[in-house]
């Protein structure tokens, strides 16, 4: 059928109304069941290259994530907002690569798998709009044989289970306090953080700089610090006096959590 130009524009506008809201919610909220994607691996069996990723975490062993981690393609990473979310993944549809009866693995998103726009016709798996997991080698080899290289997977979001409380690592300097949040249970991915100093009047919302690093320009040295943390499922938790007034840069402070 031939359509006039104005019809095309009207249809396009209609399609945008239909689809733009769905896209802007990000893949986290779009769907909740199992979905098809692909997976590869990076690093080595000891997790080399998987530490210090784009989520702003540091030593993943020390921080409790270990090697049960994945990097996410642009479509899943959501500019870093998905950092800390947990996924259950299984190898499907490739009997020659999937390990029989391997079941599923569960991983936390700790890194970004960047798109590759170079011409060679391989290694473009993380380009938008593809949903792709670049797993730690240790996790990949639990569900597929190493030589597979890339496998089709089914995945779904699952709640994160963490032992211990939410951890707040103080970074930066007196002029801008940067706080890294990690070991967050349940939804796992933090979408909003507010901070309050003990001699300050109110809550100030922090800005996310990258991954799960949040910043405030207020000088809060010498004040006990409280936080309000919201996760992607909309739950908000308040953590009062997480750090005592003599908190130090470079230190992490922990508090209970019942997300
Ligand atoms: C956490 O525990 C729940 C309930 O047992 C389970 O459904 C979920 O898959 C677990 N998540 C991870 C990341 O292990």
Image: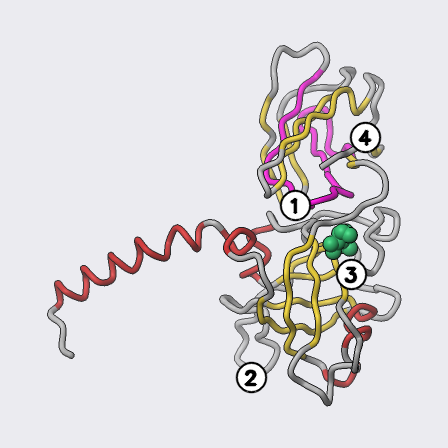
Q: Which residue is mark 4?
A: 255
Q: Position of residue 82 (x, y in %)?
A: 62, 51
The numbered mark, 1 or 2, whose residue comes first in the sequence reads: 2
Horizontal side, residue 156 vs residue 9: left or right: right
Which contiguous range is marked in magenta?
Answer: 169-197
Q: Are marks 2 and 4 in contact (CB under 8 Å)?
A: no
Mark 3 or mark 4, which is nearer the start of the sequence? 3
How far across and how far down the image is residue 172, in percent? 73, 33
**What x and y, as percent, mark residue 52?**
77, 53
Q: Are marks 3 and 2 in contact (CB under 8 Å)?
A: no
**Along the line of sight, which residue is nearer the eye, 170 or 253?**
253
Q: Which residue is mark 3?
A: 50
Q: Gap between marks 4 and 1, in whole Å?
A: 17 Å
Decide if ligand 1 comes within 8 Å of the CB at mark 3. Answer: no
Looking at the rendered structure, the secondary structure element under dot 4 is: strand
Check disc 1 and report the residue beneath it.
Answer: 189
Q: CA distance from mark 1 to mark 2?
A: 33 Å
Main structural element of the magenta stretch: helix, strand or loop? strand
Magenta region includes residue 40: no
Where the C terminus falls, by quadrant? Answer: top right
Q: Alpha-carbon neighbours of circle 2 within 10 Å: few (<14), some, or many (≥20)?
A: few
> Of marks 1 and 3, which one's residue comes earlier in the chain?
3
- Determine the residue positioned at 77% across, 75% down: 143
Q: Which residue is tagged 2?
A: 121
Q: Residue at x 75, y 70 (%)?
A: 42
């Amino acid at each position: 059928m031939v359509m006039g130009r104005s019809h095309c524009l009207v249809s396009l506008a209609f399609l945008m109304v239909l689809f733009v809201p769905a896209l802007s919610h990000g893949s986290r909220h779009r769907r909740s069941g199992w979905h098809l994607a692909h997976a590869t691996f990076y690093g080595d069996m000891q997790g080399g290259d998987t530490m210090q990723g784009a989520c702003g975490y540091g030593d993943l062993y020390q921080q409790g994530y270990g090697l049960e981690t994945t990097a996410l393609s642009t479509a899943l990473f959501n500019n870093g907002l998905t950092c800390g979310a947990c996924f259950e993944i299984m190898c499907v549809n490739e009997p020659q690569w999937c390990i029989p009866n391997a079941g599923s693995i569960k991983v936390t998103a700790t890194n970004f798998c960047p798109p590759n726009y170079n011409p060679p016709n391989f290694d473009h798996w993380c380009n938008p709009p593809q949903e792709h997991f670049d797993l730690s080698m240790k996790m990949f080899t639990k569900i597929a044989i190493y030589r597979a290289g890339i496998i089709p997977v089914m995945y779904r979001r699952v709640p994160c289970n963490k032992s211990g409380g939410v951890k707040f690592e103080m970074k930066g300097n007196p002029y801008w306090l940067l706080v890294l949040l990690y070991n967050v249970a349940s939804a796992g991915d933090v979408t909003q953080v507010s901070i309050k100093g003990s001699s300050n009047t109110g809550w100030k919302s922090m800005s996310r700089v990258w991954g799960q690093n949040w910043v405030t320009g207020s000088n809060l040295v010498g004040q006990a610090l409280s936080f309000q943390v919201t996760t992607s499922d909309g739950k908000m938790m308040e953590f009062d006096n997480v750090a005592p007034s003599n908190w130090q840069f470079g230190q992490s402070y922990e508090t209970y959590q019942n997300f």
